Amino acid sequence: TQLLEQSPQFLSIQEGENLTVYCNSSSVFSSLQWYRQEPGEGPVLLVTVVTGGEVKKLKRLTFQFGDARKDSSLHITAAQPGDTGLYLCAGEGEAGGTSYGKLTFGQGTILTVHP
Amino acid sequence: GAGVSQSPSNKVTEKGKDVELRCDPISGHTALYWYRQSLGQGLEFLIYFQGNSAPDKSGLPSDRFSAERTGGSVSTLTIQRTQQEDSAVYLCASRGSGGRTDTQYFGPGTRLTVL
C-alpha cells in the first residue's frame, strides 16, 4: 500500500507571507499531482509533475518533484486571501504495479490566508 | 458544460438503510473513480473502472459497498445497511484514458449523512 504524508495539516498565515507544503512517501510514483479544493466542490487539478527533479511554476505557485519521485513540495510566494483552501497532493503508482491508474492522496493542508 | 455530475448532492438516511449514489462522467472518458472524503481530509480511494476491464475494488472498506458502471458510462455506488461511520462526501472522477498525464476531473460530490 502506498502512503503519502502531507504536512502541515493546518496553516494560518498573513497576506504577503510565503509558505511551503510537503508531501513525502517511501514509495516511488509515476506522477505527482496537486489539487485545490473549495468547500462543497470537488478537487481541481493545479499541476502534474512526472519527471524526477521537475519544477513547474503557476504564477505565485512553485511545484517540485523530488529526484527520486518519492516526494513533492508546493511553495506559494506572497500568499493572498484568495489562496485560502484545501490543498491536496496525490501520487499515481508506476506502470505494472497494483497502484497504476489510481491516485493515493495525502491528508490535505487547510490553508487560511488572513488579510 | 460537460463536467462530471453527481446526484443527489446531499443524502440523509437512517442507520441500516441502503443508499445509491450516482455519477455521470464526462462523455467519452474511459476511466471512472469513486473516492470518499471525511471533513477537511484527503480522499480515500474506493473503486476504479477502466474501460471493459474488471474493476479494481481494492479500496472498498467492506462488502456493504459495491459499485457498477453500466454501458461504460454512468456509475452507481451502493452502500447497504448504512452505518454512521459511512457518513462522508463521496466523490466521483473521470479520466480520458487513464494515462499518467491525463487529468482526473472530479464531480462536486454527494454528502452522505447517516443518522
Image (tube, coloured by chain):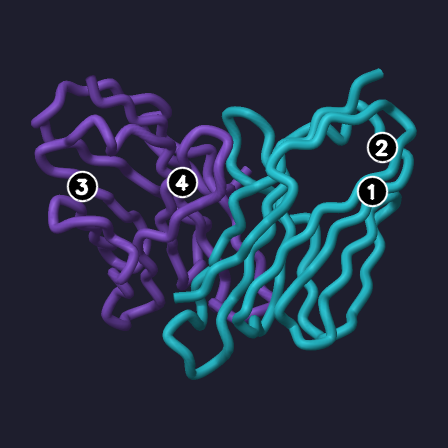
- The CA distance from mark 3 to mark 2 is 41 Å
Locate residue B111 relative to residue A109 in the image: left or right.
left
* Tag 1: amino acid: Ile
Q: Which chain is cyan?
A: A
Is residue A69 depicted above or below A32 in this figure?
Answer: below
- The CA distance from mark 4 to mark 1 is 27 Å
Label 4 SS: strand
* Tag 4: amino acid: Leu
> Residue at label 2?
A79
The reply to whether label 1 and label 2 mark residues of one chain is yes
Q: Nearer the viewer, mark 4 or mark 1?
A: 1
Q: Chain for mark 3? A: B
* Tag 3: amino acid: Thr
Q: Quick one: label 4, few (<14), some, or many (20+) residues within 10 Å?
A: many
Is residue A77 depicted above or below B97 in this figure?
Answer: above
Q: Chain for mark 4? A: B
Q: Residue at x 32, y 61 (%)?
A: B49
> Residue at label 4?
B91
> Residue at label 1?
A76
> Residue at label 3?
B78
Q: Nearer the viewer, mark 1 or mark 3?
A: 1
Query: Farthest residue toward the bottom?
Result: A96
